[in-house]
Image (tube, rainbow, N blue to C red):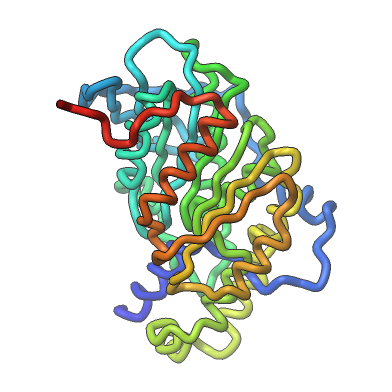
Amino acid sequence: MKSLAYSLAFFLILGFAAPQSDKKTTADSQAAARWFDYDPKQPLNIHDKLIEQFDGGTLHDITYASPKGGPVDAYLVVQTGKGPFAAILFGHWGNGTRAEFIPEAKIYARAGAASLIPDYPWDRPAPWHKTPDHFDKPDIDREIYIQAMVDLRRGIDLLLARPDVDPKRLAYVGHSYGAQWGSILSVVDKRMKTSVLMAGVAECSDIMLRSDDPGMVDFRKTQPAGQLEKYCQITGDIDAIHFVGHAAPIPLLLQFANFEQYSDKTSMGHYVAAASDPKKVLYYDTGHDLNDPKALEDRYDWLAKYIDLKREPIVPDIR
């Protein structure tokens, strides 16, 4: 049980992927993209509860309907005022929660943005909870991941349905597992003005199959021969590296950690090489959590440029 929990943590941190085949064509990506289709005419069924007022904005705990069934829990952070505001959709890291980006969303609220931070199916209470730990049944997990993606797309619908949001000023920011989805969103949903992908991994097999991390080495020893390879093979059609090369014309900001504990420079290099232009690539002297304050400053500068945010001090002057 402990090894399973450890492996799941790694998988959620990094998102799933598979060994890269020699060539993945645009047609392959387009075919896979159809897995993320949904009916945008379905009602959103939004339920909104104000939970905090802060200097410059409000924090709301909301739910909206998943096209795959059940409610999606999310935080909505909005500037005080009438707009029109920019909009930012966040994708948190897989082993975290939607709370990860609340402080950053508050900064952007003061700068003129409405932000949505949805959860993932494995964060939800019963009966909607779905844990992606079926290493012997990868088709089940693939459906869970597809739902997470569809729910993010539905989050875009929610933001753009707001009368106080400018639909031409939408951005996506995703960390780790969220970066996995950002690479796909930038291809299957061209409504973003820009995407920021933090600590993304081109091929999860770099970790699941080849990582020398002691925990992953031990976990692989507990799995039947060939099971993880089959798992990656079946889920590999929605590997980030098959999509990130088709993000253009959406500009990409790629942020990586020099002391990344879950992947190496070779993996990062594959990701960067695959990513389409225009793009900017930045590295920081930190680990996977990218907690270098400069990383936040750089994201802010990037978003200010592409979705016209006011550039305010990150820590407001309260004197």
Tell me the quarter of the image containing the C terminus: top left
- Residue 123 position, x and y percent, is 35, 50
User: Is residue 143 at all visible to an observer of this figure?
Assistant: no
> For residue 19, what is the image quadrant?
bottom right
3 and 60: which one is in front?
Answer: 60
Task: Judge whether 26 appears above or below 159 on screen.
Answer: below
Q: How many marks?
A: 0
Seen in the image, is 129 located left or right of residue 231? left
Q: In this view, does 280 lie to the left or right of 136?
A: right
> Looking at the image, which is closer to me, 139 or 121?
121
Q: In this view, does 290 lie above or below 229?
A: above
Nearer-the-camera pick, 192 or 150:
192
Rendered location of residue 231, percent (x, y): 59, 73
Q: Can you tell which quarter of the image residue 187 is in?
A: top right
Q: Which residue lies furthest to the top in this view?
A: 82
Q: Which residue: 37% across, 34% down?
A: 105
Please state, as top left, top right, bottom left or bottom right, where the N terminus lies in the image: bottom left
Q: Which residue is drawn at 31% across and 22% down?
A: 48
Image coordinates of residue 56 in percent, x first then y, are 29, 20
Q: Indicate left or right for 180 with 124 as reference.
A: right
Q: What residue is shown at x 55% (from left), y 50% (from top)?
A: 197
